[in-house]
Image: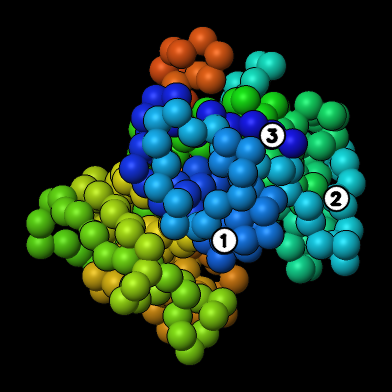
């Protein structure tokens, strides 16, 4: 069982227990966390409480290691090449290629980043997110390229999760969008949740989770724009949904893009090029950068020639 001192920095003081944990562990849904609280698996100061329990600075939150469904096969280590940007005893920073799924899902049971990490790190991965997602703190989509960090122990995982919750992790993306912008920068502040008519898709919906994306135009083309996006929150498909919402969907996006992009097999032009965080052991700020992949550069060169 993992013990989390959730409020040693007053980060959760006054917050509802379920909301605090949803922010701390974004890969767990709020309903799942509420079920664990209701079942008594998550306790505060050794006692069972309700989801709406208001945390105070002295509280200790006890959280069990996630147990996956018995029907879910545990992932196996696979010798898959990784582009490792940085690694130590606590964290490993990966530059993920296009087409790689982060953790096992239907249709991807043994070719994911998790399979590769299990082979490379052996038994040195945090277990907070369960057997199917060891080490995974945050994700990027299959066709999104670039930087993400995984954790080798639970202490590092908790530290990085808190930083995500407090919006102190630096995450910047390059995105290629349809259309041109009237202004050189802006902010999209719109809640994101699952669409009612298609639960597999996310969208800007009433009652969705708070989501904020800041953007600035880096380069303009004929009917296209290269923008930098800075995430204040980290919701599923956030940049793709927000850009589609303001009528600038990403090139190649087969889910939220233009009809001409759907079925193209290209995948969204989205690259996580800056990742920065406070190291969980040293307390020092670390920042990593990743160049645009070749396919992205080639597309930009083509657009420049057409402009």
Left or right placement of residue 255 versus residue 124 in this view: left
Q: Dot 3: few (<14), some (14–19), or many (≥20) neighbours within 10 Å?
A: some
Label 2 residue SS: loop
Quadrant holding the N terminus: top right
Left or right placement of residue 58 versus residue 153 in this view: left
Figure coloring: rainbow
Vertical order, 123 against 181 (above or below): above
Image mark for residue 2? 3
Q: Residue at x 74, y 31 (%)?
A: 125
Image mark for residue 75? 2
User: Which residue position holds label 1?
Assistant: 34
Q: Are marks 2 and 3 in contact (CB under 8 Å)?
A: no
Vertical order, 307 against 24 (above or below): below
CA–CA distance between discs 2 and 3? 22 Å
Q: Is residue 248 visible?
A: no
Label 1 residue SS: helix
x and y, in percent, of residue 260 in the image: 44, 81
Q: Nearer the viewer, residue 263 or 118?
A: 118
CA–CA distance between discs 1 and 3? 18 Å
């Amino acid at each position: 069982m993992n013990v989390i001192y959730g409020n040693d920095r007053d980060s959760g003081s006054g917050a509802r227990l379920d909301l605090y944990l949803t922010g701390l562990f974004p890969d767990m849904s709020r309903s799942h966390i509420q079920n664990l609280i209701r079942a008594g698996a998550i306790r505060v100061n050794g006692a069972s409480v309700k989801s709406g329990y208001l945390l105070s600075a002295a509280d200790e939150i006890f959280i069990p290691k996630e147990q996956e469904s018995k029907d879910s096969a545990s992932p196996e280590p696979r010798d898959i090449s990784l582009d490792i940007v940085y690694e130590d005893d606590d964290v490993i920073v990966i530059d993920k290629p296009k087409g790689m799924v982060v953790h096992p899902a239907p249709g991807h049971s043994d070719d994911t980043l998790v399979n590769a990490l299990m082979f490379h790190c052996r038994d040195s991965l945090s277990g907070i997110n369960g057997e199917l997602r060891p080490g995974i703190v945050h994700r990027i989509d299959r066709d999104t390229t670039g930087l993400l960090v995984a954790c080798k122990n639970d202490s590092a995982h908790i530290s990085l999760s808190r930083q995500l919750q407090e919006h102190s992790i630096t995450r910047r993306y390059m995105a290629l969008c349809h259309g041109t912008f009237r202004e050189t920068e802006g902010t999209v502040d719109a809640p994101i949740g699952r669409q009612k008519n298609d639960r597999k898709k996310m969208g800007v919906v009433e009652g969705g989770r708070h989501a904020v994306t800041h953007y600035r135009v880096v380069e303009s083309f004929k009917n296209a724009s290269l923008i930098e996006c800075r995430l204040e929150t980290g919701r599923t498909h956030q940049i793709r949904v927000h850009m589609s919402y303001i009528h600038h969907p990403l090139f190649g996006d087969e889910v939220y893009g233009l009809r001409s992009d759907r079925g193209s097999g290209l995948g969204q032009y989205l690259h996580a090029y800056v990742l920065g965080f406070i190291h969980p052991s040293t307390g020092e700020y670390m920042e990593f950068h990743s160049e645009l992949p070749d396919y992205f550069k080639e597309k930009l060169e083509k657009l420049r020639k057409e402009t």
